[in-house]
Image (cartoon, rainbow, N blue to C red):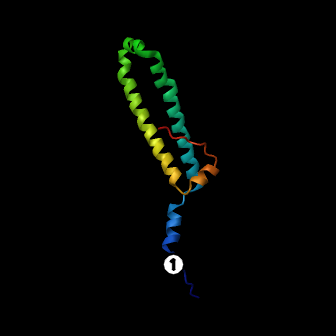
Protein backbone atom coordinates (compact mmCIF):
# COMPACT_ATOMS: atom_id res chain seq x y z
CA UNK A 1 0.00 0.00 0.00
CA UNK A 2 1.88 3.01 -1.23
CA UNK A 3 0.33 6.41 -1.29
CA UNK A 4 1.57 9.24 -3.37
CA UNK A 5 1.29 12.84 -2.34
CA UNK A 6 1.19 15.68 -4.75
CA UNK A 7 3.84 18.29 -4.02
CA UNK A 8 2.49 21.74 -3.31
CA UNK A 9 3.01 24.33 -5.96
CA UNK A 10 4.53 27.67 -5.12
CA UNK A 11 1.08 29.28 -5.46
CA UNK A 12 -0.37 26.98 -2.83
CA UNK A 13 2.48 27.73 -0.44
CA UNK A 14 2.34 31.49 -0.89
CA UNK A 15 -1.41 31.51 -0.30
CA UNK A 16 -0.95 29.80 3.05
CA UNK A 17 1.90 32.05 4.18
CA UNK A 18 0.22 35.26 2.99
CA UNK A 19 -3.18 34.53 4.48
CA UNK A 20 -4.14 36.33 7.64
CA UNK A 21 -6.50 34.76 10.10
CA UNK A 22 -9.67 36.51 11.13
CA UNK A 23 -8.40 36.77 14.72
CA UNK A 24 -5.27 38.55 13.48
CA UNK A 25 -7.44 40.94 11.48
CA UNK A 26 -9.57 41.65 14.55
CA UNK A 27 -6.47 42.38 16.63
CA UNK A 28 -5.14 44.63 13.87
CA UNK A 29 -8.45 46.52 13.68
CA UNK A 30 -8.58 46.91 17.45
CA UNK A 31 -5.06 48.36 17.48
CA UNK A 32 -5.85 50.63 14.54
CA UNK A 33 -8.91 51.99 16.34
CA UNK A 34 -6.85 52.62 19.49
CA UNK A 35 -4.27 54.56 17.47
CA UNK A 36 -7.00 56.65 15.85
CA UNK A 37 -8.52 57.39 19.26
CA UNK A 38 -5.11 58.38 20.60
CA UNK A 39 -4.58 60.77 17.70
CA UNK A 40 -7.98 62.35 18.26
CA UNK A 41 -7.35 62.77 21.97
CA UNK A 42 -3.94 64.33 21.41
CA UNK A 43 -5.29 66.71 18.81
CA UNK A 44 -8.51 67.80 20.48
CA UNK A 45 -7.62 67.61 24.18
CA UNK A 46 -4.03 68.84 24.07
CA UNK A 47 -2.75 70.40 20.88
CA UNK A 48 -5.80 72.46 19.93
CA UNK A 49 -6.32 73.56 23.52
CA UNK A 50 -2.73 74.75 23.70
CA UNK A 51 -3.22 76.77 20.49
CA UNK A 52 -6.57 78.21 21.60
CA UNK A 53 -5.07 79.52 24.84
CA UNK A 54 -2.74 81.72 22.82
CA UNK A 55 0.68 83.27 23.15
CA UNK A 56 0.03 85.08 26.42
CA UNK A 57 -0.79 81.80 28.14
CA UNK A 58 2.26 80.17 26.55
CA UNK A 59 4.46 83.04 27.79
CA UNK A 60 3.09 82.58 31.31
CA UNK A 61 3.95 78.85 31.26
CA UNK A 62 7.35 78.49 29.56
CA UNK A 63 7.95 75.11 31.21
CA UNK A 64 5.24 73.67 28.91
CA UNK A 65 7.03 74.67 25.69
CA UNK A 66 9.30 71.64 25.41
CA UNK A 67 6.72 69.04 26.49
CA UNK A 68 4.24 70.48 23.99
CA UNK A 69 6.85 70.45 21.23
CA UNK A 70 7.51 66.78 22.05
CA UNK A 71 3.77 66.15 21.88
CA UNK A 72 3.54 67.85 18.46
CA UNK A 73 6.44 65.71 17.20
CA UNK A 74 4.88 62.50 18.52
CA UNK A 75 1.53 63.44 17.02
CA UNK A 76 3.14 64.05 13.62
CA UNK A 77 4.93 60.68 13.76
CA UNK A 78 1.72 58.84 14.72
CA UNK A 79 -0.23 60.64 12.01
CA UNK A 80 2.41 59.70 9.42
CA UNK A 81 2.26 56.08 10.55
CA UNK A 82 -1.53 56.04 10.31
CA UNK A 83 -1.38 57.50 6.81
CA UNK A 84 1.08 54.78 5.80
CA UNK A 85 -1.22 52.08 7.21
CA UNK A 86 -4.22 53.55 5.36
CA UNK A 87 -2.25 53.63 2.10
CA UNK A 88 -1.16 50.05 2.64
CA UNK A 89 -4.74 48.96 3.32
CA UNK A 90 -6.00 50.74 0.23
CA UNK A 91 -3.48 48.84 -1.88
CA UNK A 92 -3.88 45.48 -0.14
CA UNK A 93 -6.08 42.64 -1.34
CA UNK A 94 -7.60 41.92 2.09
CA UNK A 95 -8.89 45.46 2.47
CA UNK A 96 -12.39 44.30 1.52
CA UNK A 97 -12.17 41.56 4.16
CA UNK A 98 -11.33 44.14 6.82
CA UNK A 99 -14.21 46.38 5.80
CA UNK A 100 -16.54 43.39 5.88
CA UNK A 101 -15.24 42.53 9.36
CA UNK A 102 -16.64 45.80 10.67
CA UNK A 103 -13.77 48.27 10.46
CA UNK A 104 -14.61 51.87 10.89
CA UNK A 105 -13.58 54.00 7.96
CA UNK A 106 -10.21 55.60 8.61
CA UNK A 107 -9.64 58.90 6.89
CA UNK A 108 -6.12 59.97 6.11
CA UNK A 109 -5.32 63.53 7.12
CA UNK A 110 -2.99 65.52 4.89
Relative side of 90 to 101, left or right = left
Q: Position of residue 69 (x, y in %)?
A: 37, 26
Q: Which residue is mark 1?
A: 7
Q: From the viewer's side, name the closer residue of 58 and 31.
A: 58
Picture residue at 54% right of the left edge, 38% below the top: 34
Q: Position of residue 97 (x, y in %)?
A: 60, 54
Q: Position of residue 72 (x, y in %)?
A: 41, 29
* Quarter occupied by residue 3: bottom right
Q: Position of residue 42 (x, y in %)?
A: 48, 29
Q: Is residue 61 above or below residue 86?
A: above
Q: From the viewer's side, name the closer residue of 79 and 21.
A: 79
Dot 1, crowdedness within 10 Å: few (<14), some or many (≥20)? Answer: few
Picture residue at 60% right of the left edge, 54% below the top: 96
Q: Residue furthest front?
A: 110
Q: Is residue 1 above or below residue 41?
A: below
* SS at badge 1: loop
Q: Residue furthest bottom?
A: 1
Picture residue at 45% right of the left edge, 21% below the top: 51
Q: From the viewer's side, name the closer residue of 53 and 4.
A: 53
Relative side of 97 to 51, left or right = right
- Count up the numbered dots: 1
Locate the N terminus by quadrant.
bottom right
Q: Is residue 66 above or below residue 105?
A: above
Amino acid sequence: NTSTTTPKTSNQRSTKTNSISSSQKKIFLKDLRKEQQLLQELEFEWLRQWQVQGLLHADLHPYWHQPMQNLYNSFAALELRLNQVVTCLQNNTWNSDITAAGATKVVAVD
